[in-house]
Image: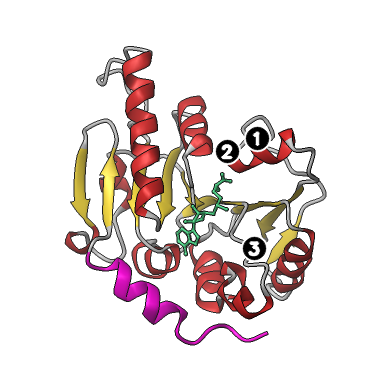
Amino acid sequence: MNAEPRYNDTFYENTTNYSKIIDVICNTTTSLQDLPTPINLKTLFRNANPVEIEVGFGKGRFLLEASRQNPEINYIGVERAQKYVEITHERFEKYIRHYAIDKGSGIFKNVRLVWTDANYFLSRYVPEESIQAYHIYFPDPWPKARQQKRRIFRNKEFLSAIMKTLKSDDGKLYVVTDFAEYFNEIQERLAKWTNLQPSSEFVGYENIATNFELKYQREGREIFRKLYKKA
Ligand SMILES: C[S@@+](CC[C@H](N)C(=O)[O-])C[C@H]1O[C@@H](n2cnc3c(N)ncnc32)[C@H](O)[C@@H]1O
């Protein structure tokens, strides 16, 4: 099971030119290339609150609910598909319009959408030991044998960036998938990172489902969850 050697080159070529970071409340878009590496998280959010990252936010249901319910936590969502970044941006705007949210009230000032490849963002922009939790929900399973090398949990640079940027004191990694075989592979691969301990419970975000989770729940599919803690 080799990591795909061209993975990073391919995605970096496609992401660096248009990579952006969106503030849904100020409605500002900043080119990622204009930001320092690593990014200054306190400057980005204008506070020193803990920061959590969702990798591959899709249609953004988790990101919206988590940021709405936890105003004292800052959330960065990273998504490489333009279509889903647009859908999620629109989802926040619709919510703001529907509930006539006062943009000065503070709601959603704790969330930023990043349109780029997660590995590119994590390995360049995220400071060491700065992240309280990572959320990786329904990562693409790439079921065909010849495509499995694209699985994000096979990318050693990505895993190493997660380990490096998670806070040592109780940094968390939440993983959810409906794909049993990939779930086993993820657990096997993460078992090699000895400073990451699997937890017997999945606590903290049980009440927030992603778009994929809602769909699969309706279909009655089994869903596998694991919470890891950095020791
Ligand atoms: C199966 S969808 C799950 C979406 C969402 N997490 C959910 O549960 O509803 C996987 C998402 O991850 C995104 N994705 C895959 N690889 C990525 C990467 N390297 N960087 C950023 N996003 C990625 C895809 O574009 C897609 O939106």
| Within-10-Å neighbours for mark 3: few <14, some 14–19, many 20+ | some
The label number, if any, that marks residue 201 in the structure image:
none
Per the image, label 2 sits on a secondary structure element best described as helix
The label number, if any, that marks residue 214 in the structure image:
1
Q: Residue at x 46, y 36 (%)?
A: 73
Residue 64 placement, left or right of 178: left
| Residue position for label 2 | 211
Residue 88 x, y percent position in the rendering: 40, 39
Residue 128 placement, left or right of 33: right
Callout 1, which amino acid?
Answer: Leu
Q: Residue at x 65, y 35 (%)?
A: 214
Q: Residue at x 46, y 26 (%)?
A: 68
Q: Is mark 3 within 8 Å of ligand 1?
A: yes
Per the image, label 1 sits on a secondary structure element best described as helix
Callout 3, which amino acid?
Answer: Pro
Per the image, label 3 sits on a secondary structure element best described as loop
- Where, quadrant-wise, is the N terminus in this rendering? bottom right
Residue 45 x, y percent position in the rendering: 31, 41
C-alpha span from label 3 to label 2: 16 Å
Task: Provide the residue span drawn in magenta.
Answer: 1-17
In front here: 217 or 189?
217
The label number, if any, that marks residue 141 in the structure image:
3
| Within-10-Å neighbours for mark 1: few <14, some 14–19, many 20+ | few
In front here: 113 or 49?
113
